[in-house]
Amino acid sequence: MSRLRRLSNLFTRRKLDQEIDAELRSHIEMRIDDNIAAGMSKEEAYRDAMVRFGSRALMKERVTSADAVLMFDDIARDTRHAIRRSFRSPAFALTAIVTLALGIGANVVVFGVLNSLILHPINVAESDQLFSVVQKSHGDDSQSYPDYLDFRSRNNTFSDMVAYKLYDAALSIHGVPKKSWFYEVSGNYFRMLGLHPQLGRFFDLNDEHGPNSAPYVVLSDSFWRDQFGGDPRVLGTTVDINKHPFTIIGVAPKDFHGTEVFFWPDFWVPMVNEQQINGYEYLSQRRNHGLWVIGKVRDGVTVSQATDNLNAIGAQLAKEYPEDEGLGARLVKPGLMGDFLGDPARAFMTGILLLALLVLVAACANLAGIFAARVADRSRELAVRLAIGSSRWHVLRQVALEAMVISLAGGVLGTLFAIGLLGALSRWQPFDQFPVHVTVVPDWQVYGVALLLSVASSVLPGLLPARQIWQTDAMQAMKSGGFGTVFRRATLRDILLATQIALCALLLTAALVALRGMQRSLHAPLGFQPEGVVSAETDLHMGGYSDQSSLVVQKRMLEQASHIPGLTAVGSINELPLNTGGSGTPVYREGTTDFRGSNSVLGAKFYSISPGYLRAAETRLLRGRDFSWHDDATTTKVALINSTFARVMFGDVLPIGHHFMIGEKSLYEIVGIVEDGKYDSLTESPQPAMFFPLAQYGDSDTAVIVRSALPPAEVARALHSTLTSIDPDLPFTIRNWQDELAVMYFPARVATISLGVMGMLAAMLAVTGIFGMAAYSISKRWKELGIRVCLGAQRAQLMRSALGRPLAILVTGSGAGLVVGVLASRLLAQIVYQATPRDPLVLCGVLLTMALLGLVATWIPARRVLAVDPAQLLRDE
């Protein structure tokens, strides 16, 4: 294609050169003739003419330059003319600009989010060489610390690798504890990312000399300013993290907030201090997967080569360690916890971007129809221009420039709107219990997309009238007052309007699908009842307690909480379901001796609960018994399992009294079966879960839940007073359990809001499109309608004649949009869980909405039709 274009340019240039040469020759010959007539000889006349005209090449350049200047002058004049025409039709110009601004603004917002969070999530140098190292199987995104060390030391395709983990802890400044969120990172974390401290220094591998050997803290810029007032003398200050002293040695750069795009930490500490901070040492546990790993590939190394290198290492580790059976790796873009957030976020943003583009296409179709009608109304004016010698290219250029002016104005307005919305989005913190921020900073790529969309939006409205202009007969147009192609023009506008309505029906379908998905999410069975429950969450490590010493404090909490007036049930669990999830582990049959992963029967979520938890959570016990405080370290290990666990492990056999294993010395007797529930997400399929007695399976993570019919605020105050009386230095997060679920409902709410906005924009475009066509059709047939009234036409006949075509297009376009919506189920499924455009309520809702939009759009034109006064019309004529 490029060769053909160059060849075409070559021929065009040759033709221009030939024309200039011919023009110069004619002037030289005329000068020679004049000289000969003045008495010069032929040789003298030729020499004089050549001297006067000088160098042919220089003259050719001057002529070409003059032509270019004239061309630019013409374009500038036509642009000024287009701007003046827009000011003479302010209603049309404003409507068109706002319509395009909404479409372009929506696309810029979506692309801005996609660019900042998906395409360029980590704001560090050479970020394109950074990749998260996740497991081969989707959904398993973390690594163990020993495997991370082996991957880092044995590979030859990465320049370096780092590991990190996210935690919360109690940071005490001057003896006042504050719950804070932080990164535990490997010592080479800051070095690999190429960062330089804003203040002080970073810790590195040279600071690490075994477990608990590097008690250092690097503060984030925001935490440093909020808690220490930006005081540079903070360096060397000692703070307590979970009752253990750490020294502040540096402050991170202002624009760096870690390697997870949504998570803004308060500080960073070395990973080797894990046992000191959290009371558990995972650094030697090859089975314990929980670290995120990011590697930086060497220059010239491809993703495929790096992946193959890591998989070869994984295969070798599997031979050396049974725990690493099936170990492998994939490389994915960092910043979104591997595939955990990455896959859903990419699919969601891609789907939303496609729908936003459809909004813009609908807006362009709307504008194109309006421009076609305007060109038809200006047919006599354009015909006169053609008749007096204006070229068709010049007329077409004027119309295209009018569309370009409108589109650029809409693009500027839409971009300003998008920048304001992205700024508000960056200041928004959706969850007060987590340090989550959605930071979107527009860059040159965002502005480039805005400009590209603005220019592209002018193509269809600007070129659509080209056929009308190119095929018109100027004389016939001046006689008839039009281009003489009314039927064809109307058909073209019909197609545009039908396309626009089909797109609008598709977007309305998506919006209603999202509403239905939100409704299903709100009414999905959870396996517990959060209404009427207040939770108090803490980690006893924050108070300096170990896992072994936590049980005494937990019992005291439950005992004193049970004395609060008005409570009907009290219990505790180590991790609330649908909060941060809870852990999972392989489960084996009784008698298993080989505990490799391939020999497990299933993988199950596991929780540690107190007696009374099931009643407080209103989780139904289907068979067997609940735990009691007698189920302690001195008695047989027991467990509760859910229905899915029982079905997968035991089939139709009643499992009460049977056993299962989760390790070589961990044999558990099943004493009860509880109902299935949701543990990680609202959209998950039923998965196995097991529950262990708190007195047998201790855990410092504690969520005390209390059920009461009293107002939640009153219960929260009483619960806070009771628990802080036990240990004033232990920070608690006390909330209504329903509020805790806001994180889980967040994706469904975002999808509903996003698609609702798209549907609203689509509805506005449908109304303006139908209204514009109906009003234009009536205005062009006003005389005809008056004559019909004179001849005795009834109101119903008038309405059918005047509005039949727009309504037929509405029905046709709506039907096409519904069909496309049903076919686009896969696209909608990327945005909304279990998207079902075939849902009868969705189908009926779309049809009803489109009918209402048609009624609204045709209401004013219909009233004009009914108000036709033939006598007044004849007097006006």
Image: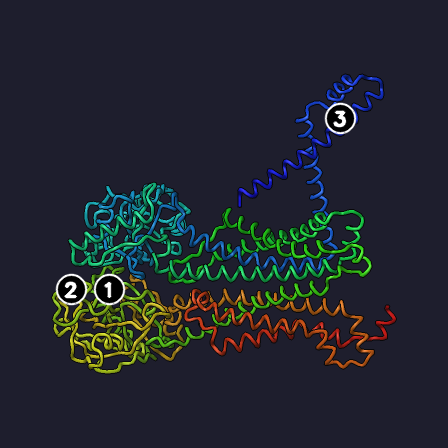
**Label 2 neighbourhood size at 10 Å, few (<14), some (14-19), many (20+)?**
some
Q: Residue visible at 76% across and 30% down?
A: 26
Establish if 825 lies above or below 150: below
Viewer-nearest of discs 2 and 3: 3
**Relative depth, front residue between 732 and 832:** 832
Dot 1: within a 10 Å radius of its alpha carbon, few (fewer than 14), some, or many (20 or more) residues? many
The image position of residue 765, as x and y in percent, is 61, 65
In the rendered image, residue 72, in percent from the top left (x then y), is placed at 68, 40
Q: Which residue is mark 2?
A: 595
Left or right: residue 386 compared with residue 431 = right
For marks 2 and 3 on the same chain, the one whose residue lies earlier in the sequence: 3
Q: Secondary structure at mark 3?
A: helix
The alpha-carbon separation of the residues under discs 1 and 3 comes to 101 Å
Which residue is painted at 37% across and 70% down in the image? 682
Q: Where is residue 476, by image quadrant?
A: bottom right
Residue under label 1, please give it: 700
Q: Please name the colour scheme applied to the rendered image.
A: rainbow
Whichever of callouts 1 and 2 sits on the residue coming sooner in the sequence is 2
Q: Residue at x 22, y 46 (%)?
A: 154
Frontmost residue, 125 versus 48: 48
Identify the element where label 2 is drawn. loop
Q: Which residue is mark 3?
A: 28
CA gap, disc 2 and disc 3: 100 Å
Instruction: Give the residue type that dot 3 points to.
Output: Ile
Q: Residue at x 76, y 19 (%)?
A: 48
Question: Looking at the rendering, which quadrant does residue 528 occupy?
Answer: bottom left
Looking at the rendering, in which quadrant would you find the C terminus? bottom right
Helix, strand or loop at label 1? It is loop
Q: Position of residue 695 (x, y in %)?
A: 19, 71
Q: Amino acid at mark 1?
A: Ser
